[in-house]
Image (cartoon, rainbow, N blue to C red):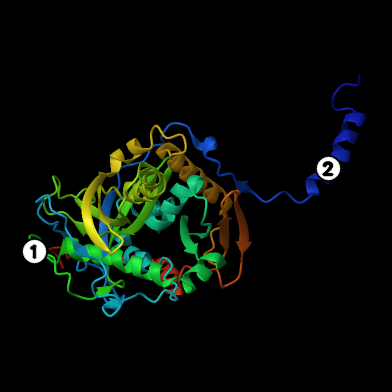
């Protein structure tokens, strides 16, 4: 046997060299739940940095004008009997879904407040900026069996931005949405009209138009594992009677679902619908989801409150249920995967992360303008130096 470092050893190295020039397999991330079943990762309690509103024309306002106030019916033991079909379709104004808003509204808020962020520009340089809805999709991925997704990612001034891209399948589904589904979507918004007032202590007025352009959005800061997060999510209402008036703990999420009549129906509800409700509310720090259960005629016959932190109890002993640790560990793994993939600081260089149920998350590099999602107005404004605080005149001046 020859000692290491001899000519023969060197020859072995030379022979192996061409193998290094083979194309490396594209990186991917597996999604099987069993791979993410460790302890629950660190998730910093979300703190609200600010808010913004979108009006009936979908115009941005940097204030809380669209916030509504939780005003449930008195608990008399009687059925609420809300007619969720009332006003459909004549009093229904829907958002133009052909308009790709991407992160624009959140970026507008960020531009207005970048000088006041705790930790300053250096904190933002290490953060991930996205919508709560995109993170919700990541949380539920290990258990999702029907709908795939695509997320575009780019790095600019150190910050990683994530923005959803509509998949071809989702587009086909949206354009061919059956009338019943359109009506169910209306009923969800109508339920909010019955449960919310325009001012604290006010009474709901369900007679008005349902306009899905209007939205109140909270902007929050959090951290998952070692990933600082800045994200925004739509909030249904705030509860003036909440134990704490500090957002987001005073916020309430409102949902509707069909009435359940059998243990099998409840089990399916806990496995599928409750998982999405939990992911959405947990990320934002919303403590309660209030559900209106409707009968086949579209009337709400009962209300039930689901505390976010207790939702897992419904599936804890269900071997086909979901586990919050798996959801959060997968999300943290995806964020690491994205951070390690998107290394070049260039808003025009976009990486497209794609996932279909049953497979891993794959990634492709996109250098065309079609996929770039950070608007020019944002990139240019962020590139300019922050204005320095106005100089205070000294007594000599």
Neighbour tally class for label 2: few under 14, some 14-19, many 20 plus, Cα within 10 Å: few
| Snapshot quadrant of residue 197 | bottom left
| Snapshot quadrant of residue 313 | top left
Residue 67 seen anywhere in this rendered image of the structure: no
Residue that numbered label 1 is attached to: 202
Q: Residue at x 49, y 45 (%)?
A: 143
- Mark 1 → mark 2, Cα distance in angstroms: 75 Å
Picture coordinates of residue 291, whole percent (x, y): 26, 53
Furthest residue toward top: 1
For label 2, the SS is helix
Q: Quadrant of the N terminus?
A: top right
Neighbour tally class for label 1: few under 14, some 14-19, many 20 plus, Cα within 10 Å: few
Residue 44 seen anywhere in this rendered image of the structure: yes
Q: Residue at x 43, y 42 (%)?
A: 328
Q: Quadrant of the C terminus?
A: bottom left
Picture coordinates of residue 374, whole percent (x, y): 47, 68
- Mark 1 against mark 2, which lies toward the viewer? 1
Question: In the shown orientation, is residue 59 left or right of residue 97?
Answer: left
Earlier residue among tags 1 and 2: 2
Residue that numbered label 2 is attached to: 17
Residue 198 versus residue 330 in the image, above or below: below
Question: In the shown orientation, is residue 66 left or right of residue 2?
Answer: left
């Amino acid at each position: 046997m020859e000692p290491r470092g001899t000519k023969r050893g060197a020859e072995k190295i030379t022979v192996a060299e061409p193998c290094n020039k083979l194309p490396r397999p594209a990186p991917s991330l597996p999604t099987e739940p069993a791979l993410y079943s460790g302890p629950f990762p660190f998730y910093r309690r979300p703190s609200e940095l600010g808010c913004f509103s979108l009006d009936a024309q979908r115009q941005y306002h940097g204030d809380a004008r669209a916030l509504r106030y939780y005003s449930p019916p008195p608990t008399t033991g009687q059925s609420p009997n809300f007619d969720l079909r009332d006003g459909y379709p004549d009093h229904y104004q829907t958002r133009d879904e052909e308009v790709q808003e991407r992160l624009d509204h959140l970026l507008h808020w960020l531009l207005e407040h970048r000088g006041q962020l705790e930790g300053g520009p250096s904190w933002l340089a290490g953060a991930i900026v996205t919508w709560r809805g995109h993170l919700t999709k990541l949380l539920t991925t290990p258990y999702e069996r029907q709908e795939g997704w695509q997320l575009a990612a780019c790095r600019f001034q150190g910050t990683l931005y994530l923005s959803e891209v509509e998949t071809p399948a989702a587009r086909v589904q949206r354009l061919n949405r059956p009338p019943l589904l359109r009506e169910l979507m209306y009923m969800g918004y109508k339920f909010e009209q019955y449960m919310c007032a325009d001012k604290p202590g006010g009474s709901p007025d369900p007679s008005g138009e349902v306009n899905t352009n209007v939205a109140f959005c909270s902007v929050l800061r959090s951290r998952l594992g070692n990933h600082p997060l800045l994200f925004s999510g739509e909030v249904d209402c705030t509860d003036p009677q909440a134990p704490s008036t500090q957002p987001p703990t005073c916020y309430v999420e409102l949902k509707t679902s069909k009435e359940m009549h059998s243990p099998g129906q409840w089990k399916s509800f806990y496995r599928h619908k409750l998982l999405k409700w939990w992911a959405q509310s947990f990320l934002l720090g919303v403590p309660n989801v209030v559900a209106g259960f409707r009968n086949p005629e579209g009337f709400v016959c009962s209300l039930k409150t689901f505390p976010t932190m207790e939702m897992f109890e419904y599936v804890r002993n269900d071997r086909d249920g979901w586990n919050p640790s798996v959801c959060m560990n997968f999300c943290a793994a995806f964020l690491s995967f994205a951070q390690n993939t998107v290394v070049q600081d260039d808003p025009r260089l976009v990486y497209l992360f794609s996932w279909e149920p049953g497979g891993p998350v794959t990634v492709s590099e996109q250098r065309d303008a079609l996929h770039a999602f950070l608007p020019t107005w944002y990139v240019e404004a962020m590139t300019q130096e922050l204005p320095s605080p106005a100089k205070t005149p000294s007594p000599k001046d």
